[in-house]
Amino acid sequence: MEKPDRSLAEEFRRQPIGHHSPELERILFLFRGQGMAGKFVLVEDEPFRKWRLGQLSGRRGDPVKIVSDRVFESVEEAEWEVFKRRWKIHFGEDLE
């Protein structure tokens, strides 16, 4: 997939959870379909209150590796962090 318009990243930033445009859904489908090895995920530290960024090994049964000391107190901010990292992997571009 060629690099999409950054306005789709802004769409996700405004509303990471819920309904998205078909163009953004295609990007999310690409991100979610990535192989498990190295995939960024959210780890819930405290149910519905605190999340951390993790990364999968790709091997069943291995623990999720926590990759940051940062604790997110909003699922929206946590989802945005995962989105930014997946965007970088797929399109080679940092999002602010």
Image (cartoon, rainbow, N blue to C red):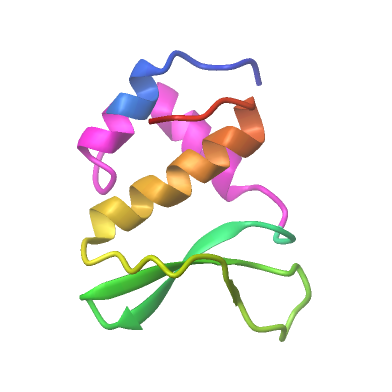
The residue shown at (58%, 34%) is 88
The residue shown at (26%, 48%) is 17
In which quarter of the view is residue 21 placed? Answer: top left
Q: Position of residue 42 (x, y in %)?
A: 44, 66
Residue span colored magenta: 11-35
Task: Give the quadrant of the C terminus.
Answer: top left
Q: Position of residue 80 (x, y in %)?
A: 35, 46
Q: Is residue 51 above or below residue 23?
A: below
Residue 21 visible to the viewer: no
Which residue, as the protein is rendered here, is positioned at the far front?
Answer: 69
The residue shown at (42%, 22%) is 23
Task: Give the quadrant of the N terminus.
Answer: top right
- Left or right side of 69 for 66: right
Q: Is residue 29 magenta?
A: yes
Q: Position of residue 44 (x, y in %)?
A: 37, 77
The residue shown at (51%, 32%) is 27
